[in-house]
Image (tube, rainbow, N blue to C red):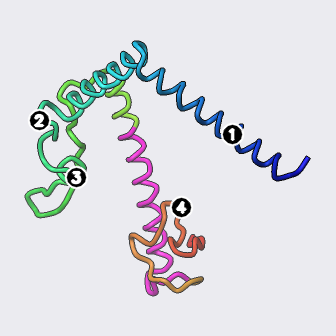
Amino acid sequence: MDPKIINILILLFTLYMIFSAFNYLLSLLFSKIGLSVIFLIWLLYQFYKRKRFGTGGSGGGTYYDRINTYSQDAGGNFEYSRNPGPQNPGLFSRIKEWYQERKRKYHYAKFKKNWEAVQKKYGSDMRCPYCGSELTLFNVTENAQCNYCKNRLI
């Protein structure tokens, strides 16, 4: 058989399969079950949106107010403060918040220890010995590596 004819047959068979799948999905979406599933998804999303953002839709405050985890104290210093979240969180929410707070404290303590060790070692010349980039608070990973060249600093 000619290869062109085989390629045309394969193309027609593929197009037939795509058309059949499209027809099946279209008939499913406009059946009673499909419409009820679409309505149920929409209804659950409305509940989720209302619970998460409140009745106003925005949740009070700006985006930056919601993500801000540092607050200014009387001395003008910024100190970490937890996001207040909902007033009466459920059991699983409290467990999740407790776990996230422990995880945050662990990683903060680990990074602080490594950063102090880097500062002690490179106190006079705060440059990476491998790539020469300046070692700053934002240029060192929590594992005490240079953020540019991934050179181990300790």
Q: Residues within 10 Å of mark 4 (few under 14, many from 20)?
A: some
Badge 1: how crowded within 10 Å, few (<14), some, or many (20+)? few
Residue 109 among magenta residues: yes
Query: Which circle's residue, 3 or 4, is located before the other in the chain?
Result: 3
Residue assigned mark 2 = 56
Among numbered discs 1 and 2, the one appearing first in the sequence = 1
Residue at 22% x, 54% y: name it: 70
The numbered disc on residue 14 is: 1
Image height of 133 relative to 63, above or below: below
Position above or below: 151 against 16? below
Do residues under tags 3 and 2 come within 8 Å of each other at their CB atoms? no
Q: CA distance from mark 3 to mark 2?
A: 20 Å
**Res 34 → quadrant:** top left
Disc 1 and disc 2: Cα gap in Å? 49 Å
Mark nearer the viewer, 2 or 4: 2
Instruction: Name the dominant secondary structure of the magenta segment.
Output: helix
Q: Position of residue 137 (x, y in %)?
A: 39, 70
The kind of secondary structure element at disc 3 is loop
Question: Mark 3 vs mark 2: which is more N-terminal?
Answer: 2
Q: CA gap, disc 4 to disc 1?
A: 52 Å
